[in-house]
Image: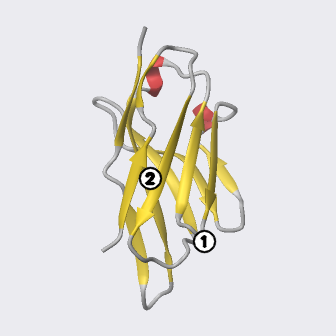
Amino acid sequence: HVHLVESGGGLVQPGGSLRLSCETSGSAPPYIAASWYRQGPTKPRELVAMLTKDGVTHYLYFVQGRFTITGDNAKNSVDLQINDLKPEDTAVYLCRIWGGNTSEPFDYWGQGIQVTVSS
C-alpha cells in the first residue's frame, strides 16, 4: 500500500513561516502532478498549489507570492513553503499525488496536517 505522510505543521504566529513536507511510503510510479490542498474551519477544501512533473507550478490567487511548492517526482515527495502566514491560512493541509496511465491510474492523498496561525 502507498501512504502519504505530511509533516511540518503546527502553531505559528502571524507573519511566521512553515515548511510542509509530504513523503511517500510504499511503491508508486513517479507522479505526473502533486498538489497541496487545505480545508479551513467551516470552509470547503481548496487547491492552493500544484506542481507538474515538468516543473510547472500553479497557485491559488490568494497565496501567490507567499506559498512555494517544490518536489521530486522520482521520490514522490512534495513540499510547501509558506511565508508571511496569516490567520486565514489556518487549515488542515493535505498533499496529493497522482499519475499513472489510463489502465493503471493512481491518486493518493495524505491524511492532512494542521496549521494554526494565531498570536
Most extreme residue toward the top, as rendered? 119
The residue carrying pointer 2 sits among few (fewer than 14), some (14 to 19) or many (20 or more) residues within 10 Å by Cα, namely many
Residue 10 against residue 57 in the figure, above or below: above
Determine which residue is flagged by label 2. Answer: 95
Q: In the structure shown, which secondary structural element does the residue marked by tag 1 occupy?
A: loop
Q: Amino acid at mark 2?
A: Cys
Q: Position of residue 49 (x, y in %)?
A: 57, 47
* Identity, as a three-letter code, of the amino acid under mark 1: Ala
Q: Is residue 49 left or right of 41 when viewed as pictured? A: right
Q: Quadrant of residue 115?
A: top left
Q: Position of residue 97 (x, y in %)?
A: 47, 64
Q: Say which mark, if any, is on residue 114.
A: none
Which quadrant does the N terminus fall into? bottom left
For marks 2 and 1, give the CA distance.
16 Å
Q: Residue at x 43, y 91 (%)?
A: 103
Q: Return the residue at label 1.
A: 74
Q: Quadrant of residue 5?
A: bottom left
Q: Secondary structure at mark 2?
A: strand
Q: Earlier in the sequence, mark 2 or mark 1?
A: 1
**Residue in the image at 57% along x and 25% along y:** 17
Rendered residue at 65%/30% (across/down):
66
Q: What count of labels does the image hold? A: 2
Picture coordinates of residue 4, whole percent (x, y): 38, 59
Q: Residue at x 43, y 8 (%)?
A: 119
